[in-house]
Amino acid sequence: MNYAFAAHEANFRDWCNSGFQGIPERGRDFLRNLSAPTFTPPLWRHQLEAIRRSIYSFEVLGKKDLLTNVVTGGGKTVIIGGVVAYMMQVHGIQQHLILVPNTVVRARLLDGFDPGAKDGDYVFRQFPFFFGADKDTPLRISTHVMEVGKAAAGIRGANIIIGNVQQLYEGKDNWKVIAQNTDKLCIYNDEAHNTRADLYNDLINKLKPKRFFRLDTTATPDRLDGLHPDSEMIYEYGIQEAMRDKVVKRVVTFQPEITKVKFTFYDWETKKEISAEEVPWDAIDKKKVPAVRYTMSHEPMAQQIAIALECLRHQRLTVPIADDGKPAYKPLLFVVALNIEDAKTIARTLEEQKVSGEYLRVLLLHNEVDDERKEEAMSINKDIRNCKYDAIVSVMMLREGWDVKNISAILLFRKFSYTQVGDRKFSVYGPQIIGRGLRRVNARGDQWEQCHVIDHPIFKHDWLWEMLEAARYQGPLNPGDIIDEAKIPEPVMQGSLDIDEASKPKMEAFDLSGLPPIPEPEILEPISDWRAYLDDCQYDYRGQRISQTISQVLSRNLDSGHDTLEKPQLLKIDPALLVVDAPNDEGEIKKKLVQRIRDLARTAMLEYDGQADTRQEIILRVVHEHIARRLTGGVRVHDLNDVHRLQLVWHLFDQVKSNFYNPRLIASILAAPPVTEEYASQAGNPLQPA
């Protein structure tokens, strides 16, 4: 997304230094109040900068559609609150519409703007944005949340209105009330990247006659489909700067050092070995094994989990002790899977492991779980000391808005992608997922917490770690290793944070010239004919086992605040426990395959643009057609009564998934979807329920 403020930087700094000339006197008083000694707690300097730039762009430049790009954990709610307070006090705008992408973000925003929230959450009680004659205004502010079953009439008298784009389609009651009862409206779109561009732009165009001002906020404005909000980006405060300022946790990555890999091929029916091949790690690319299939193979998966649990142990040992003599919080492991099937396997494996002598309690989250488990995920942050879970395994459900401060380790079982424009790389899901672990437990405390991210070299995420400026653990780390803090590079320390220096030019980035070269991913050409592409896909009917040889396991002493570990407790997970064979019962395997296909269609859409909407039915139809054409002799899975062929589909399904987890393929299918009549016989029309 283009940075629109570059031409105004010098004039903006002059404006700040000259006392904010050219705006209403009440506006100048507001800005002076933000940096006054009586404004406590003080804003972070980037929050002050974002608010100042928003006001300058509106008042001086005449801009009405703005965007601030601020890191997860950087206090975007406070920035929105500051602008709301300005518009109320300076321009008398009494109604403010805050758009959100999902219920997770809505719950976070409601905590910030609900006068009934606890003292530490309500933004206008926490920060004295209202001052002088308006000091008591926060006591009179009312908030309305648009949700299913709630009368739209509450919008009329509300100052803060929170809801999503879908709840404002023309013809719905919420839209009618806003259209008929609001005159001037300020609009804020939180996590703006996550709204489908066509839906959001259509709504904004309809609201323009009433729109007095609009501010989009996000940490990742650019999407992999090349679309972004149509507002003008006036400020960018990324993870690199936030880590330098210690606004977020420090990210430290861990990877196993692999020397060689053995591929064993066997007959999928008899399980007898056919052949074996051993290759050095530096030749692994020639095997063209999809990254997720590799890491979800039994032995590599077990080893990644073992490393993650060692990180979790370390994080638990470094938690500060509270006044009652107990740890101040309970570190959690957050695991990211690509699809429901993988998530279930990972969760089952974790539940069989012990940390500190106790079996892990795991919360599994995906779109099929009941509302009770989703509510549990939402409530974890309310008591970070006594959370009953040790690990959370998620599939694309907790990407943004879910703010749990005690996420201390993140285990990746999926690969992230990026797009490149010139010298800059843009990614949505990678920074979003890492953002779940960025929020500090004590934002203004002296101890700078760490977030450990367990990665695998086959994902080739070096570009992501350079983007985030993560510290890389110096040396190999293997299952059972003890983490030696001396091998985590010292941070580059920044000077004290002088809030009056908010308008100074950004600091130069660290010199990364000493790092090894980034392995660039293969440049992929667009798919012009998706039918031909799928017909040309090659399937390996052999079973495959992957064994990786990891470098020498090193013992390291770790002197923690609680105890001293003098010897590593080697953790071993038997890969044989991870095997899930195909069911033998025809009805059971057919039912599970249909569900796996539906899950594949949904996940493929989420991978494409994050929107699992009705378009997934198109992908679902194509998957059914592809399996019928290539694997089952033209018979759809719903109608197949041959157990042997059903088991063949089960056996090859990982390869089917790899084909469809390709954004280029999905884009091609959506651009030229199958005609219903033409593909009805093989795709199964109408599609039977799972």
Image (cartoon, rainbow, N blue to C red):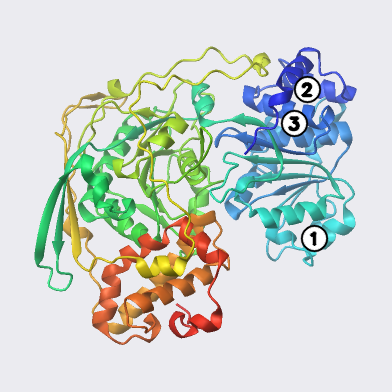
Residue at image x 48%, y 42%?
Answer: 436
Q: Locate residue 652: give its quadrant.
A: bottom left
Label 1 with label 3: CB-CB less than 8 Å: no
Count how many numbered circles sit on residues in the image.
Answer: 3
Amino acid type, mark 3: Ser
Checking the image for residue 259, the label placed there is: none
Residue under pointer 2: 31
**Mark 1 → mark 3, Cα distance in angstroms:** 27 Å
Residue at image x 27%, y 46%?
Answer: 285
Checking the image for residue 175, the label placed there is: 1
Q: Position of residue 404 (x, y in %)?
A: 49, 42
**Mark 2 → mark 1, Cα distance in angstroms:** 34 Å
Residue at image x 58%, y 16%?
Answer: 497
Q: Position of residue 598 (x, y in %)?
A: 44, 70
Q: Residues within 10 Å of mark 1 (few under 14, many from 20)?
A: some
Amino acid type, mark 1: Trp
Residue at image x 67%, y 46%?
Answer: 229
Residue under pointer 3: 54
Q: Nearer the viewer, residue 521 or 134?
A: 521
Q: Is residue 240 left or right of residue 87?
A: left
Q: Position of residue 163 (x, y in %)?
A: 70, 54
Mark toward the viewer: 1 or 3: 3
Observer able to see residue 686: no
Query: Is 86 situated above or below 590?
Result: above
Which of marks 2 and 3 precedes in the sequence?
2
Q: Secondary structure at mark 1?
A: helix
Image quarter where the C terminus lies is bottom left
Q: Nearer the viewer, residue 319 or 350?
A: 350
Q: Nearer the viewer, residue 516 or 269?
A: 516
Q: Secondary structure at mark 2?
A: helix
Observer able to see residue 199: yes
Amino acid type, mark 2: Leu
